[in-house]
Amino acid sequence: MITFTLNGTEVTSAMPPASRLLDSLREEFGLTGTKEGCGEGECGACAVLIDGLLVNACLVALGSIAGQSIVTIEGYRGTERFRVLDEAYMKAGAVQCGICTPGMILASEALLSENPNPSPEDVRIGLAGNLCRCTGYNMIVKAVLDAAREGAGLW
Amino acid sequence: MVAQNKPETLAEALRIRAAEHVVVYAGGTDIMVDHDPHANFLFINGISSLKHIEDRGDHLLIGAGVTYAELLRSDIVPELLKRSIVEIAAPALKNIATLGGNICNASPLADTPPVLSLYDTTLILEKTGSMREMRMDDFMLGLKNIDLKQDELLTYIKIPKKDFTDIYYEKIAQRKAASISKISFAAAATVQAGLVRTFRFAFGSISKTPLRLPELENMVEGRPLHEVKADADRIVALADEKIETRDGKRSTGAYRKKVALRMIRDFIGTLGQTDS
Ligand SMILES: Cc1cc2nc3c(=O)[nH]c(=O)nc-3n(C[C@H](O)[C@H](O)[C@H](O)COP(=O)(O)OP(=O)(O)OC[C@H]3O[C@@H](n4cnc5c(N)ncnc54)[C@H](O)[C@@H]3O)c2cc1C
Ligand code: FES
Ligand code: FES
């Protein structure tokens, strides 16, 4: 049994310690906002925050996070920062099919909390591990820059 | 209750390591790719004593559990090591992947070992009640093949301080963020008062382990800079003889040979820019 904090609440998983965090989130806790793209750490669709750091949940064994704090897109949704990012993504047309979006939003959050005033190049580096098959990235970069401006002081 | 195998102390980790048949799990970014849901992992990411970077006077002592992100944030980590890390994958990977994992995975494609080799890096390997120290170059034997005993853990990476005046790093890969290297080249030299005192380089992705050419280092070290530059053709020709490249999945041997030789020539060309 692995105990950890999930979106602010202490939970216990009954899955074996070597299971992927991604599977526990989706199957055990029904948090399907965390997507599976590649399953190999290359696309960022499964990104979550572990103790505030961006990590790909497909590469995380459940046992490694015992006692740690996980935030998924569902937990992040309640925040003011999410509201600002959500609006900026919408306005910039940065969402098409949406598969990459939860990971993109969390990567944006991780980037902005480290660097509240990023340059376009900083944004590209910060989101380099998140693939998007639809948008061509320019709208996403714009969304993050807009959010940084609109949400000045939040990060 | 099933044992969680996520100890907080090294002593407890070493006890479990000796008592059970475990797979060591640091950041998990190598072992989780071919994921075995029934593996018995020993999670070492909760051991705070393996997460320090310390200045020990003549060397740096880096805990095996220090992540790439932590190395990049430190101001005592050598610039050349940082250059090899900046190009490794994306933030989500840098946040958990460890230096110890990169060494122990011992992939020919790994990015930090060529740099660590240039620094004559040694490793501290511990088991309950004893420790040993060995050169990283002797520890790494080829993919997933390392000189580690069943009851041991890699605990610290010891990087001697060097007075390199010139550093050079280049990695050729398809795509920056998830960039498995076709070839990487790390080089360093000490040029003082017109003399090339030390000169060394190592290639990644060419052979099973980082490829250094001691004959070539000897041929250059101790000679005047202008002479070394004038001799670049002969040095490159010797490298041409010594380096064997085979066709790989990502590029042909001929291509990599050509690139390798060009990198050596370029490094020689840049030598001595900071010498006054
Ligand atoms: C998308 C992606 C991109 C990548 N890009 C790069 C890249 O550009 N360059 C590169 O070099 N690598 C790359 N890697 C590989 C990997 O991220 C690195 O090798 C990383 O440093 C491994 O560290 P880890 O802590 O995650 O290792 P783990 O997966 O935890 O362990 C790796 C191996 O080392 C053993 N081990 C780990 N720590 C210890 C210890 N202290 N004592 C004894 N044994 C130990 C484990 O048992 C395992 O066999 C990439 C991986 C992915 C998934
Ligand atoms: S599914 Fe995890 S990175 Fe692609
Ligand atoms: S919106 Fe479809 S993958 Fe990004």
Image (cartoon, coloured by chain):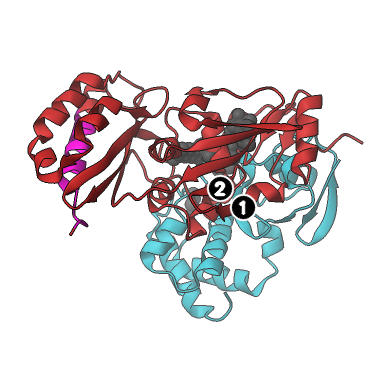
Label 2 marks a residue whose chain is B
* Residue B70 in the image, given as x and y percentages of width and height: 55, 54
Disc 2 residue type? Leu
Q: CA distance from mark 1 to mark 2?
A: 8 Å
- Given the current orientation, which residue lies at the most extreme right position? B1
Q: Return the x and y of residue B104 as percentages of the image width and height.
A: 56, 31
**Residue A95 visible in the current orientation:** no
User: Do the residues under discs 1 and 2 have CB atoms within 8 angstroms?
Assistant: yes
**Would you call the spot at circle 1 few (<14 residues within 10 Å), some (14-19), or many (20 or more)?**
some
Helix, strand or loop status at disc 2: strand
Label 2 crowd (10 A; few <14 / some 14-19 / many >=20): many
Q: Which residue is mark 1?
A: B52
In front of the other: B111 or A108: B111
Identify the residue position indicated by label 2 in the image. Answer: B61
Q: Is residue A9 left or right of residue B137?
A: right
Location of the N terminus of chain B by quadrant is top right
Please identify which colour was used for chain B in the image. Answer: red
- In this view of the protein, which residue sits in the foreground, B19 or B58? B58
Range of residues picked out in magenta: B258-275
Callout 1 amino acid: His
Q: Under tag 1, what secondary structure?
A: loop
Measuring from the top left, give residue B202's x and y in whole percent. Answer: 33, 34
Residue A50 falls inside the magenta stretch = no
Which hue is chain A drawn in? cyan
Q: Nearer the viewer, mark 1 or mark 2?
A: 2
Name the residue at 53% across, 56% down: A104
* Chain that bears disc 1: B
Give the prevailing secondary structure in the magenta stretch. Answer: helix
